[in-house]
Amino acid sequence: VPVESILLSSRLRDYTAIFESDGSFLGDLVATANRIFIVDENVWAAHAGGVLAALPREDVVLLPIAEETKTLSSVGLVWDTLLERSAKRNMTVVSIGGGICQDITGFAASTLYRGIGWIFLPTTLLAQADSCIGSKTSLNYRRFKNLVGTFFPPNAVHIYAPFLATQKEIDYYSGVGEVVKLHIMGGVDSACRLDEAMASIGEREVSVLHRTVRDSLLIKKSYVADDEFDIGRRNLLNYGHCFGHAIETATDYAVPHGQAVVLGMVIAQQVARDRGLETDPAQIELLDRLFVKSLLAACVPPHIDLDRVIEAMGHDKKRTGEGLVVVMAADGFEMVKHDDVSVAEARRAARSALAPCGGLA
Ligand SMILES: NC(=O)c1ccc[n+]([C@@H]2O[C@H](COP(=O)([O-])OP(=O)(O)OC[C@H]3O[C@@H](n4cnc5c(N)ncnc54)[C@H](O)[C@@H]3O)[C@@H](O)[C@H]2O)c1
Ligand SMILES: [Zn+2]
């Protein structure tokens, strides 16, 4: 794979996401002045003897990873570590891990001295294909997911597909869910390309992954550009998330995020079909095929309590008016957002859409 990069612009700074064809970039990072490596403990366990062997052990700090600890207390531990190691404002944190590592270290880097250097190496499919650009950092607070956060772009992102070889299947397919979302949002050509690549993605073929991750990021970039602070078009990236978040809550997070997003897209498209927005048989067939293929390896629990899903939807933090807010793909892969979906309509759509996926309580 030739080295490629994507330029991202942001109010704070411009930065590039670089696709690395071999591990030599790690040596360059080691040679950077005043850097420290903060590494997801599981990534270290999987890659210390391989991809990450170039890192000097004394400059590596291991970060314990759990959704429950994506909080200010972990950020405090990172601040402590950075202050112990160096009192300099001109330090650079190199974080290596998935979305949790990104959120904790990104938040810590954005707030210490009101912002220090930050380079991110995403090691999960979700982080590579989706979260590594867009400049959001998020922490959980009390029972609220991603309630607290900042906008803080990294100085650079390095994307290296071989990290993905060691991801657990369930986490990997969570990323596949977001990849499917983005490729549908990219239009008919990208959705068809993904459909053809799906078997190789399942095999984690490095060249296919690089291309798929690159295309995902280019599509995301097209939605984030000119709306860094999420007030307009960027909202459409919430496709699948309106119902998806509710499914996560209603199942106490037993359904991994990206899989919940796929189920959320399945319901959203049912609403679109009920409203006569999606009528093209070819599009319907393609979307359904992508949904099925991306859910195949999922561990979707047999019972999703529809009442809890609907109740959780009512609590959606992005909701502004009376109705439920749903993003859908209309004919021609045109993304639309409706904010007048009634509870009864959502319930009907969810019931008929999810019936083939397993039992509903
Ligand atoms: N800031 C944003 O814009 C943004 C966007 C989307 C999601 N997120 C957040 O990202 C998190 C989910 O991130 P994720 O899906 O990347 O996974 P993750 O960070 O939750 O990691 C999942 C598990 O995989 C392990 N892991 C990571 N890379 C690995 C590898 N290469 N090999 C083996 N194990 C590995 C981790 O240690 C962890 O146990 C959520 O907290 C979500 O809220 C943030
Ligand atoms: Zn998501």
Image (cartoon, rainbow, N blue to C red):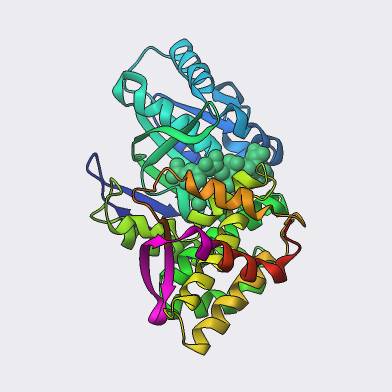
Q: How many marks?
A: 0
On whether residue 285 falls in the magenta region, the answer is: no
What segment carries the magenta color?
327-346
The answer to whether residue 32 is above or below residue 130 is: above
Quarter of the rendering occupied by the C terminus: bottom right
Q: Nearer the viewer, residue 182 or 266?
A: 266
Q: In the image as oriented, which residue stretches furthest toward the bottom?
A: 281
Q: In the image as oriented, which residue stretches furthest toward the front?
A: 344
Q: Position of residue 46 (x, y in %)?
A: 70, 41
Judged left or right of residue 307, residue 282 is left
Is residue 78 in view? yes
Is residue 247 in view? no
Q: Position of residue 333 (x, y in %)?
A: 41, 77
Q: Position of residue 73 (x, y in %)?
A: 53, 18
Q: Position of residue 272 (x, y in %)?
A: 46, 73
**Which residue is pictured at 36% across the width and 68% down the height?**
336
**Which residue is pictured at 67% across the width and 36% down the height?**
42
Q: Nearer the viewer, residue 211 or 142?
A: 142
The answer to whether residue 19 is above or below residue 358 is: above
The answer to whether residue 301 is above or below residue 48 is: below
The answer to whether residue 73 is above or below residue 339 is: above
Assign the magenta stretch its main secondary structure. Answer: strand
Q: Nearer the viewer, residue 192 or 243?
A: 243
* Among the 4 quarters of the image, the one containing residue 79: top left
